[in-house]
Image: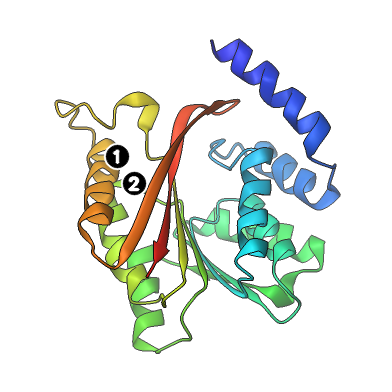
Amino acid sequence: MQAKWTENDLFLFQHLIQEDADLENALEQSHKNQFPEHEVSKTQGMLLSILIRMSKSKRVLELGTLAGYSTIWMAKAIPDDGVVVSLESELDKYELASKNILCTGLQDRVDLICGPAAQSLQKLIDAEVEPFDFIFIDADKPNNPLYLRLCLQLSHSGTVIFGDNVIREGELCNAENKDPKVMGVRQYIQDLGSCEHLDSTAIQTVGIKGYDGFTLTFVK
C-alpha cells in the first residue's frame, strides 16, 4: 500500500502545491546534512498554512524546528508583524534552520530558540510572553504530555493546537506497546480528552510519510 499512498501524494503535490524555492532549499539542505526525514509533507505544510491563515494567527509557537521546513511554511502564512517562535533542542539542527531561514529573508518573522523544549517553554512562561494563537507540537513524543501542560500556559481562548505524528503506524491503541513514543502520544490524547476547556479531534493520514495522523485542538 505504501507505493500507492506515495503515488497519490506525488499527484497531490503536483496539482495542489506550487513550487517554492525557499521550501525546496530547506528540504535539500536537510537531506544533504542527513537529518532524519521527519519534516511535514508538502500537503501537511499547506494544511498548517491554511489553518494559520483561517485562524488569523499572528503569534505561532513551534516545538521541533529540524531544518526549518515547517517553520518556513508557517512564517509565510503569518502577517508581516507576526512571529513564529520555534524551539529546537539540537545545535546542528538549530544552526542549519537559522541558515535556511536567513536565505528566505523571513528572519524578522522567526525567533529560533536552541535548548530543551521544556526548559525553553518554562522560560517563555516565566517571561510572561504574550500568548500564542497557534501552537504546533512536533518534538520528542515521550514528552508530549508535559509539552501540552506547558503550552496551555502559553495559550488563550481561541488558540489552536496541532499535534503531529500521533497514530504511530496504528500502534496508538495497542496497550501492550510500551514504546515511549507510543506511550507519550497515548497519554497526550488522553489528556486532551480529559481537559474540559479543550475541544479536540484527530485525523488519521496515509501518504508519502506512511500511516500516521494528527490532533487538532481548540482552546475554549
- The residue identified by callout 2 is 141
Residue 209 visible in the shown view: yes
Label for residue 128? none
Query: Residue 122 appears in which quarter of the rendering?
Result: bottom left
- Work out whether 68 lies above or below 212: below
188 vs 64, left or right, is left
Element type at mark 2: helix
36 vs 191, left or right, is right
185 vs 13, left or right, is left
At x 76%, y 77%, the residue is 80
Q: How is the image coloured?
A: rainbow
Q: Earlier in the sequence, mark 1 or mark 2?
A: 2
Amino acid, disc 2? Lys
Q: Nearer the viewer, residue 7 or 201?
A: 201
- Give the residue furthest to the left: 176
Q: Residues within 10 Å of mark 2 (few under 14, many from 20)?
A: many
Label for residue 181? 1
Residue 96 visible in the shown view: no
At x 58%, y 25%, the residue is 207
Q: Position of residue 2 (x, y in %)?
A: 55, 14
Q: Position of residue 121 (x, y in %)?
A: 38, 72
Q: Quadrant of the C terminus?
A: bottom left
Counting every numbered tag in the picture gives 2
